[in-house]
Amino acid sequence: MKIYLDQLPPRLTAEQGQWWFVKSILDRVLMALAYLATVVAFGMPFRRNDLIVVLIVLMVGAPGRVPFRRMSAAIAWQLVNHWGLTVLSLGLIAGVLGLLFPADPALVEPKVAVAWSALSLLTLLAAHAASPFFAPHVSRLYRKDRVLIVGINDVALRLSRLIASGEADGQQLVGFVEDRSPQRLRRLAGERVVGGFEQLGELTRANGVSVIYLAIPMAQQPRVLGLLEQLRDTTASVFFVPDVFIADLVQGRVATVAGLPMVSVCDTPLQGAAAARKRALDLVVTVAALPLLLPLLGTIALMIKATSEGPAIFRQRRFGLDGREITVLKFRTMKVMEDGHTTYTQVTRDDDRVTPIGRFLRKTSLDELPQVFNVLAGDMSLVGPRPHPIAVNEQYRKLIAGYMLRHKVKPGITGWAQVHGQRGGNDLPSMRKRTEYDIAYLQSWSLGLDVRILLRTAVMLVRGDMMGY
């Protein structure tokens, strides 16, 4: 994280150098080349409109922020998003031009548009899948910044491994600068120490170092100031590397607030477009399922009313997003109705409070079906940490570290814990295990993960693997 006060950066950093520029345009160029290849494949002459299409793709294509050197399902999903934005933008521009100039030929021939859409997506996926093989060879073609890491600790060793693996494009590690105490040298496991703190300035000049990472506690102010004083006579860029890994990060990232740089240690993964995509998934899946669910909901409600006294729907107060209170809907399965606000008695398998139809509903999880209306209302999501009664929350928030982090997203009908068999049980070990799964979900959330959980839930319901109580 580099801080400039009231001035522009005086030079390009490693993330703004040659390879950064190549990556920023590579995906756009690949999509443009795919369009030209499509035109050639159809044997069509190159028109003025084709040149316009190529220019539009190069201008509106999503910036190249997708990592190279590795491929994963998350990276593939990023590519699909970038590809979709480009195709959508071109379609909107073509539509507007068609409305403004109806007499002119279409900007893109329909058959070309369909073929190009498929070919461009395959090209992006194939190029990134092959990137781990060709990226190291490309990196040899551009200048690298020589790097010193000052201090030896867990975050410094992690940083050195990232540089060595090529994740920090355009950087080459010269070595570590550290006071040569035997205790710290033992932590190196073979890493190269090139000198001590008092030699930093000399080492920087002698090795042509252009980037320095200070991986020492900023609380050691005199030592930090002494190191910075040595570097006043060099042209190296200096970065502080905060050791925030002492805590389990939840969506850790660097952010700015009113221009002030900050490091996020705990945050929600659902902001901006991510929140909109998750909400869209909730609405599309729920609305699509309603024609099948409504008859089932009506039948279950009639069966409950016919077999026991009381309402068919049971309302219980629970915590939702950011710990705000919500009312969760369930089919009534018991003769009594605890709202869960001040007291909650865990239901057992032989609990005489459970009605005969309620016993079946709880075993098959059908008692949770009315929560689709909570999803439509926006209080819940299809996927997320399961909401607990308020009395349960108040009990375990004091016993389990990080328990309340579960509420950084909307609660869900199903979740990462549930598809791993962590369903039911209010004892401390069970709650601790569910909390671990819920926090892992927050740390690695993606829309693809939500889809995976929904599919896995459906399979488990069909197999009867989600039987609970």
Image: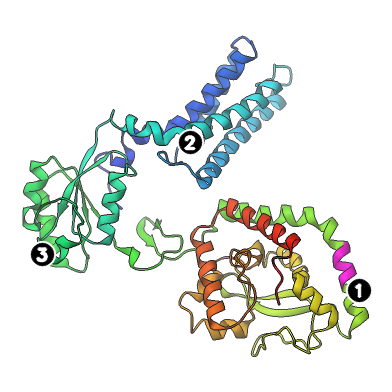
Up/down of 424 relative to 203, above or below: below
User: Could you give the CA–CA distance between mark 1 and mark 3, rounded to whole angstroms?
Assistant: 76 Å
Counting residues from the start of the chain, the first of labels 1 and 3 encountered is: 3
Under mark 2, the amino acid is Ala
User: Could you give the CA–CA distance between mark 2 and mark 1, rounded to whole angstroms?
Assistant: 54 Å
Please, which residue is most extreme toward the right here? 306
Under mark 3, the amino acid is Ser
Question: Dot 2 lies on which element?
Answer: helix
Under mark 1, the amino acid is Leu
Between label 2 and label 1, give the one nearer the viewer.
Answer: 2
Colour treatment of the image = rainbow
- Residue tagged 3: 181
| Residue in front for this viewpoint, 83 or 422 | 422
Counting residues from the start of the chain, the first of labels 3 and 2 encountered is: 2
Residue 229 in the figure: left or right of residue 271: left
At x 60%, y 75%, the residue is 324
Which of the labelled discs sits on residue 302, or is there none?
Answer: 1
* Residue 184 position in % (x across, y down): 16, 63
Residue 296 lies within the magenta run: yes
Region in magenta? 295-300
- Residue tagged 2: 129
Which of the labelled discs sits on residue 183, or is there none?
Answer: none
At x 70%, y 61%, the residue is 460
